[in-house]
Image (cartoon, coloured by chain):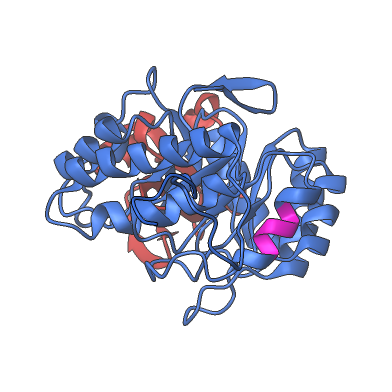
Chain colours: A blue, B red
Amino acid sequence: MDKLVIAGREFSSRLMVGTGKFASNQAMVDAMEHSGSEIVTVALRRVDIDNPEDSLLTHIDRNRYLLLPNTSGARDAEEAIRLARLARSAGCEPWIKLEVTPDPYYLLPDPIETLKAAEVLVKEGFVVLPYMPADPVLAKHLEEAGTATVMPLGAPIGTNRGLRTRDHIAIIIEQAKVPVVVDAGLGAPSHAAEAMEMGADAVLVNTALADTPDPAAMGRAFKKGVEAGREAYLAGLGPQRNKAEASSPLTGFLRD
Amino acid sequence: MQLKINGQSRSFDSPLTIIQLLQQLELSPERVVIELNKKILTAEAHDTALNEGDNLEIIQFVGGG
């Protein structure tokens, strides 16, 4: 498979995975390993002082996975910038999945605050991967602001509903000069394959891996879906037609 | 001395440095990030002495998408 390059760094896998909502740390590690992913997202939250849990980072092999902290929970640019700076101060590389979601019901990204935060974080030297509405004009603005990728949503976070924004994602892919990572809403390997067949550079999946009794098997299934979609895209899909075009010869039939 | 930690007021004996506070809370310094009065503290600043009314955020990585 051809390499994915983000901000000058090469990755063999085009599947990024999230670490949220798994039934156990072991289930999370299984999903990560079997997915073949090299980039995993994490969130920042307050420590429960009265009941500190075991640290997530003890379960993630930092030599194998690039840790991509997100700014989830941020409701505006200021909160997102604060979380990004905190993540960097924790000794992470300055990569950040920028996420600004003011509305907890649909968790849709705020385009204006996302762009504002991206402009600041790029200037501060962050490699910014912004979660965004599937809006081709916004994708251009983010790219011009210097983001390393654009990450349009397929459907709202955690919905498993697939590529509901397909037509706009197609325009984003057509126009983008940075990698397009389809994030959010991909609930099945076929959804991931569909995004990759369209020419997306990568996908990010979390809920679909955590929402199954067998995260390891689902990790493998998504890996195959992503690889199949990429390979088909590189091979070049045949055109769609309105009328049938016979696959078998239309001569030499056994009749008079 | 009263400190506000993660939004809650708590009492501690002074003097107290950040590193001593983490020891009392049984938190290892490598796993947390600390904001003191909205300023991020680097690991080298963990010997900073705390003062009455200081506002701390003690944060860690958790699972997320």
Q: Is residue A11 above or below residue A130?
A: above
Spot the residue most to the left.
Answer: A213
Spot the residue most to the front.
Answer: A256
Judged left or right of residue A73, residue A25 is: left
Quarter of the rendering occupied by the C terminus of chain A? bottom left
What is the chief secondary structure element of the magenta stretch? helix
Q: Name the residue nearer the viewer: A65 or A84.
A: A65
Image position, residue A84 (x, y; %): 61, 46
Q: Residue at point 59% right, 32% down?
A: A234
Residue A102: quadrant of the picture: bottom right
Total labels drawn: 0
Q: Name the residue nearer the viewer: A41 or A165.
A: A165
* Residue A131 visible, this angle: yes
Q: Is residue A148 above or below residue B5?
A: above
Q: Name the residue nearer the viewer: A88 or A49.
A: A88
Image position, residue B43 (x, y; %): 50, 27
Q: Residue at point 59% right, 42% down?
A: A96
Q: Is residue B11 above or below residue A7?
A: below
| Residue numbers of the magenta segment | A168-172
Image position, residue A42 (x, y; %): 42, 45
* Residue A40 visible, this angle: no
Q: Residue at point 37% right, 20% down?
A: A64
